[in-house]
Image (cartoon, rainbow, N blue to C red):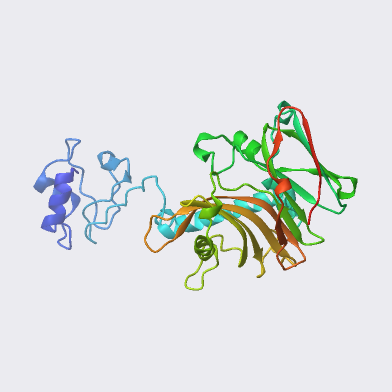
Amino acid sequence: MSGFVRRAVETQGIGSGTGETRASCTAKFGRARSGAARPAPQWGAPVGPRAEDSGRDGPRAPCCGPGGPAPLPQRRRRAGPRPEERRTPARDRRVTFASFACFVVAVCLGCPAARAGGAQVPVGQYLYAKPANAEQFTGSLTVTFAKPGAKMVIAYGRKYRKDRRSREVTTEADRETFKPYQATVLDDGRKAVVEHLPADLYDLVVIQVKGMTVHEGLSMQLGADPAQATEALFSEVRETLSPRDDRIGGWDAFFDTKQFDRFESDGTRGAVFLQQLRRGKSLAESGAEIKGCIHSIDVCWMERAKVEGVDWQVITRQQLYRDEIESREFFRHKYVPELSGLRVGVKARAAGPIELP
């Protein structure tokens, strides 16, 4: 029966308790598509589907009968995710968290340092230069000291310091070359040798952990004028860099105690040699609590701030030393002119013996 006839039957209520059969329906609304009316079935006899009532959705139910029109069969569901499988924000979060958890597990299983229970690069090792092509630099520096004793000697060139060489015009390989150089200490601390140095003027920093002393000969601020490094400016710098009580954070807030040892300025810019301590609780990469105290020795370059209410602002800084030691006190600081301005060219250079007061 055509779709028009079926709709008409359902609309007129034919077969809904009126006793009309398929034959009467066909006689009233026309013949079937085959062109001939089928004989009327006996009352109560099952009526089978006709060929023209079959389609892609399966056999169609008869439209008439003693119980009224039968419900049309449901169409097959199209391919696609079930309602419970459709993407929702909550499902996306679950998937993202699961992916992140798998990533963390994979990293922990594949990283030997993670499996070793917190094994890590020694503190401060990344601070010093290790150029890939160091052999091209033929200059070297040998410094002797008047007294023996364990020492850490650092040679810091002037030409390519951070305040004079912008990061935007240098490559990663360049910056590795411009870092401070750590010397090899020999003869029970009486001699320090630095090989493969680029040609430059070098200032030295000597750190003695056992005696808790730091001697340095750094020329920090380019064009510095001693008359401009007034106590008033130095006080403003200390206030800018010191931990703040009126707000959370501050410059390098990881260190909770700071000491400002020396200041140079040209009037508008300045540089300060300072020590920083982390006396509060701190954790290693493994999560274990660090028993000692983290010490840091830095040079920080600053300029007059252009913002109202702020005296100075930090331009850049160079960390010269960082380590975890037992002492929770500052190194005793001393400036030594003999440690300043040691020129190195393409040949070996020797200096000393230097007396460290």
Q: Is residue 118 visible?
A: no
**What's the residue at 56%, 43% (across, down)?**
162
* Count of marks, rendered view: 0
Residue 279 placement (x, y as % from top left) = 67, 69
Residue 167 placement (x, y as % from top left) = 52, 40
The quarter of the rendered structure image containing the C terminus is: bottom right
Return the residue nearer the eye: 247 or 316: 316
**What's the residue at 27%, 53% (across, down)?**
72
Q: Is residue 332 visible?
A: yes
Q: Quadrant of residue 323?
A: bottom right
**What's the residue at 69%, 62% (across, down)?**
294
**What's the residue at 10%, 46% (across, down)?**
29
52 lies left or right of 348: left
Return the residue nearer the eye: 221 or 103: 221
- Whether 145 is drawn above or below 69: the answer is above
* Residue situated furthest right in the rendering: 187
Residue 61 placement (x, y as % from top left) = 28, 51
Return the residue nearer the eye: 222 or 309: 222
The quarter of the rendered structure image containing the N terminus is: top left
Return the residue nearer the eye: 136 or 59: 136
- Whether 56 is drawn above or below 147: the answer is above
Q: Quadrant of residue 201?
A: top right
* Residue situated furthest front in the rendering: 227
- Whether 288 is drawn above or below 188: the answer is below
Residue 281 placement (x, y as % from top left) = 66, 70
